[in-house]
Amino acid sequence: MSLYALIKSNGPSGFGYRSTAEDVTAGVSLAGKRILVTGCNSGLGFETMRVLAQRGAHVVGTARTTGKARDAAMRIRESAEGIACELSDPASIRACVAALKAEGVPLDAMVCNAGIMALPKLEQAFGYELQFFTNHIGHFMLVTGLTDLLAEDGRVVMLSSAAHRMAPKEGIQFDNLSGEKGYKAGMAYGQSKLANLLFAKELARRFAGSERTANAVHPGVIATNLMRHIPVPRPILAGIMGLLSAVAFKTVPQGAATQCYAAANPQAAALNGQYLADCNIAPARPDAEDAALAARLWDVSEQIVAKLP
């Protein structure tokens, strides 16, 4: 099948590569629903918040600062609010969790969209490589802290990536979570995205027997601020994007489609522990299905969180 035909075709869900967030939620009423979206101030997070609010949900959007989160919420005509949640700062995460728990209003979905990508040099938070800490540990703290608020049929959506295939051959380098024994930007990013996927899989196993679900998604390749650290000169990167965008790159509305599908489309209520791309179940690398690896990551994550100030 040609690349053009693949892009144009839809999968079993009825949606595909070119479907947008509005397409996959068309006709869906989210009235009375409350949904949390991290990284709401730009890109996929803002589009996800906008579309879910358009469908009637009250969306709680988080960003690194209160100002950024509230500014994003104010740009939404429908019901939305903004709250700070800096995923590399445990105090900020705890404050977000405490504020939402104080409100006591159930969450019908959590869309863990925020993240950082391909930092050109090793950076750390609390002794851990920053991409792993922000993309995985931050969301681990947030989701586990808010699980008591998740509705009986609530959904957790983790933004993973096809880049999870770039993770080390052993999956998670438990002996090098600091990055000090060797750091490669792409591999570290891949490890954090594999961690997101494994977290969703383990969470899904823990949800077994309930109506709650947890799934991981690949949004596609989108030209957003997430790509700002890719080590290609900007004029060249701009030229590549211009050449390929019509064929290979998704727009932001298309990139937000799969997470909106997983969070809100009625079809997705039957999915649990899946890896989705283009709004359909997709294959992941084999060790993403390793239950022992996922359980170990969960245990190590709990140990890390327990030691944080």
Image (cartoon, rainbow, N blue to C red):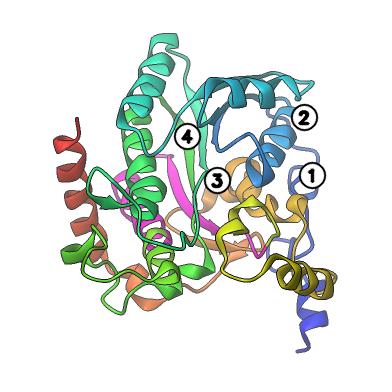
Would you say residue 84 sits in the magenta stretch?
A: no
At numbered mark 2, what does the secondary structure look like: helix, strand or loop? helix
199 drawn magenta: yes
Q: Which residues are drawn in magenta?
A: 193-221
Please state which amino acid type lies under the numbered disc 2. Gln
Q: Do the CB atoms of the residues marked 2 and 1 lie less than 8 Å apart? A: yes
CB contact under 8 Å: marks 4 and 3? yes
**Circle 3 sits on which residue?**
269
Which residue is denoted by mark 2 in the rendering?
A: 54
One can see residue 170 in this view: yes
User: Could you tell me if the residues under marks 2 and 3 are in contact, i.e. CB atoms within 8 Å?
Assistant: no
Residue that mark 4 sits on: 153
The image shows residue 30 at horizontal and vertical percentages of 68, 29
Q: Which mark is residue 22?
A: 1
How far is the residue under mark 4 from the one under mark 2? 21 Å
C-alpha gap between disc 4 and disc 3: 8 Å
Residue visible at 31% across and 25% down? Answer: 91
Q: Amino acid at mark 1?
A: Glu
Question: Distance from label 4 to label 1 (Cα)?
Answer: 22 Å
